[in-house]
Amino acid sequence: MHVALKCFATLSRFTPPDAEAFAVAPGETAGGLAERLGIPMADLKLVFVNGEHVELTAQLKDGDRVGLFPAVGGG
Amino acid sequence: MPALLDLDEHIRRLARPEALPGGGECLMLSMEATLELARSLGRSRTKHLPLARVELAALNLGIAPERYLRNFSTYSYAEQARLLSSRLALVGLGGLGGLVLELLARAGVGQISAADGDEFAPSNLNRQLLCTRRSICGYKAAAAAARVALVNPAVAFEPVAVFLDEELMGRFLTGAELAVDALGGLNDRPALLRQAAAAGIPLVTAAVAGQAGFVATVLPGAKGPADFFGSEENGAAENTLGTPAPAVATAAAIMAAEAINILAGRKPGLAGAMLVFDLETMSFERVSL
């Protein structure tokens, strides 16, 4: 199964080449996915799946749109 | 000083039909006539400046003040009048704050208090509307006051050239209908979120880093983005990506539109949600918090 992945701001450097259809294992969590991408957990502040804020323990499903967001404070 | 009924009479007498580009016509009070009537009113003990009193009276008569003509019919006369009677507390007059202030002053938000203790530095020139070769090294709050007076003198603007701690934030928000978080960095945002909740008013907040950013509306007691971001110690994305002008202006324009939604009495479009954007991929997504 695959998810569409979007890494924002400083996390964009962890974007894999196949982010549009990124393969995930059955039962893989949002946190597990971030870890596999090499994103330091301290830098990951918000995870969105299909437009909803979810916990790191949320399990991913085929076709999910996943957004990963760091702390952003510039103005 | 003419009595209020006299003011209405004067406005009716000076109003002129104006053809609308979309067909039909409306009654309009020219800017010149508005200024002339305001001068004849002089200062009063009401919260509104004379110019705002004339504009409000015209709107109540169904007559469009010329300076707001191009807002109709996006904002009804009643909504425009409500904006003129509204009170906003804006915290931060940097990249986001300067642009939000510009848009809300032009929209005719009647009372705006804005706080920032900072002075302009050369590194502000890349994005901050109020930072120019002339204003550099001066107080941001002073440049803001000068700009509002130039752009729309109907706005009663209160500049506060002070960095607000949490207690001062609480006092600063007193009497406002809406708080706008245009702060820079992460450290002061949780305090503003708490104080807006304590004041029982919504908070429109935004931040950018590089080409990405977000805008959110936090209703009193609800969680906001700042609740998830932690403090500056762990680093914020803008410290490496910076704050280029297009992302700042995008966030500021969305903040201003949302502030107008709320102050005009409409439903906030982003309550409990964030609009996240990335100008590199040109993607916008509304996500719930």
Image (spheres, rainbow, N blue to C red):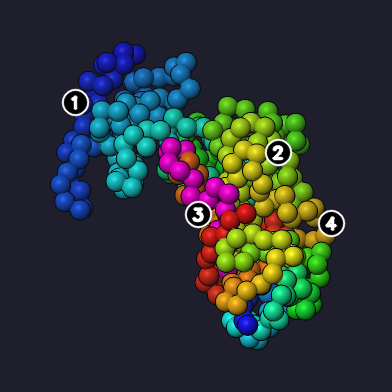
| Residue at x-position 53% and y-position 51% | B270
Up the image or down, B29 lies above or below B23; here it is above
| Residue at x-position 26% and y-position 21% | B8
Q: Nearer the viewer, mark 3 or mark 2?
A: 2
Q: Which residue is mark 1?
A: B13
Residue B90 appears left or right of A69 = left
Q: Amino acid at mark 4?
A: Glu
In the rendered image, residue B33, in percent from the top left (x then y), is placed at 28, 31
Q: Which numbered disc flags the more N-terminal residue, 3 or 1?
A: 1
Are labels 3 and 2 assigned to the same chain? Answer: yes
Q: Amino acid at mark 1?
A: Arg
For residue B35, say whether it is visible: no
Residue B84 appears left or right of A44 = left
Q: Which residue is mark 4?
A: B233
Q: Which residue is mark 2?
A: B194
- Mark 3 and mark 4: span between their CA atoms? 29 Å
| Residue at x-position 59% and y-position 73% | A64
Q: Amino acid at mark 2?
A: Arg
Which of these two is toward me, A71 or A52? A52
Q: Amino acid at mark 3?
A: Ala
